[in-house]
Every structure is written in C-alpha cells, then in structure tokens.
Amino acid sequence: SEKVSSETNRSLSVNFNETKDQLQGASPLLVNGDITYRKDSGSFRPTVSLVANYFHDRIYSLGSFDRGNIVEKGIVMLNFVSSTQIADKWNVSFNVGNMLNYKIRRVQQNSEGDIDTYNYQAGVNFSLGLKYNVF
C-alpha cells in the first residue's frame, strides 16, 4: 500500500488484504499440446490437427478492503484445425474452435465461500475457408 501511495505522489491509495500473493494474471500451470497428421501425396496435401490448451486457476484481480481475490477458474480448450492443399493453387480449410464449449468463470474468494462474479459460456466456432493462390 505504501509503495503505491509513494509512486503516485499520494494521489492513489490501496488497501490490499495480503502483503504477498500470486502474480495477477499468471497461472501456476499452463499446458499446450497438439496432435497433427500430415500427408504429402502429390498435389493433395492434407494437414489435420487437434490442439489442446489448459491453464489452472489464476488471479484476475487482487482482493482489497477485506474482499477476497477474484480468481479466473481454469479452462481446458480443444480445437480442431484442418487444411488441405489441392493442386498448386487451391487450399480448403475447416476449423472447429472450442469443441468442449468451455465456460469462463470468475469467482471472488471469501471466508463464507466463493461468489460468482462472472459466468459466460463461450460457444463453439466453425469456419470453412477456400483460398486460391495467385502467385
């Protein structure tokens, strides 16, 4: 609190609950991975990938004035990405984003229990693309 006050010429004051805490916005565990299949067969060259990401609970906002930290709950993301080159000029792609339709959830940690502050279902995204290379 004193550091914030002195660095803002006493124009801003804060009242954090703790003198030490985790870094805001940084997850203690982050995992990324993918499984990709690629085949070169003449002018037909498909690539198919399953891409997964996970981050564990992380502080979204530090608690102050006796209110607990707001924590973004961990999320598992799974995406399907495919692309196929046909001949020398054409490329077709199909992607599915957020196959698990994860929920973005933030809770405020309090002594009586966690309270939801934000709850949002992200939805599944589909895309289909067709590309022609001029050069």
Image (tube, grey):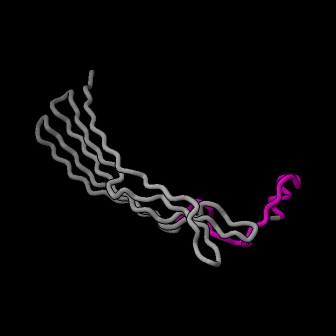
Q: What residue sits 62% from the left and 62% below the top?
A: 24
Residue 120: x, y in percent?
A: 48, 55
Q: Is residue 123 left or right of residue 69?
A: left
Residue 104: x, y in percent?
A: 48, 58
Whether residue 81 appears in magenta in the rendering, the answer is no
Whether residue 10 appears in magenta in the rendering, the answer is yes
Residue 52: x, y in percent?
A: 35, 58
Instruction: Report which quarter residue 112 is drawn in.
Output: bottom right
Question: Which residue is at the far bottom?
Answer: 111
Q: Is residue 9 left or right of residue 43?
A: right
Q: What residue sits 24% from the left and 41% below the top?
A: 83
Instruction: Report which quarter residue 4 is drawn in.
Output: bottom right
Q: Viewer-proximal residue, 12 or 119? A: 119
Q: Is residue 39 left or right of residue 103?
A: left
* Quadrant the N terminus occupies: bottom right
Q: Is residue 76 above or below residue 109?
A: above
Question: Which residue is at the far left?
Answer: 42
Residue 8: x, y in percent?
A: 83, 52
Q: Viewer-proximal residue, 3 or 135? A: 3
Q: Is residue 73 above or below residue 84?
A: below
Q: Viewer-proximal residue, 40 or 64? A: 64
Instruction: Report which quarter residue 65 is drawn in.
Output: bottom right
Q: Is residue 74 left or right of residue 83?
A: right
Span colored in magenta: 2-27
- The main secondary structure of the magenta stretch is loop
Q: Viewer-proximal residue, 124 or 88? A: 124
Q: What residue sits 86% from the left and 58% below the top?
A: 6
Q: Is residue 76 above or below residue 88?
A: below
Q: What residue sits 30% from the left and 48% below the top?
A: 96
* Quadrant the C terminus occupies: top left
Q: Is residue 32 above or below residue 83?
A: below
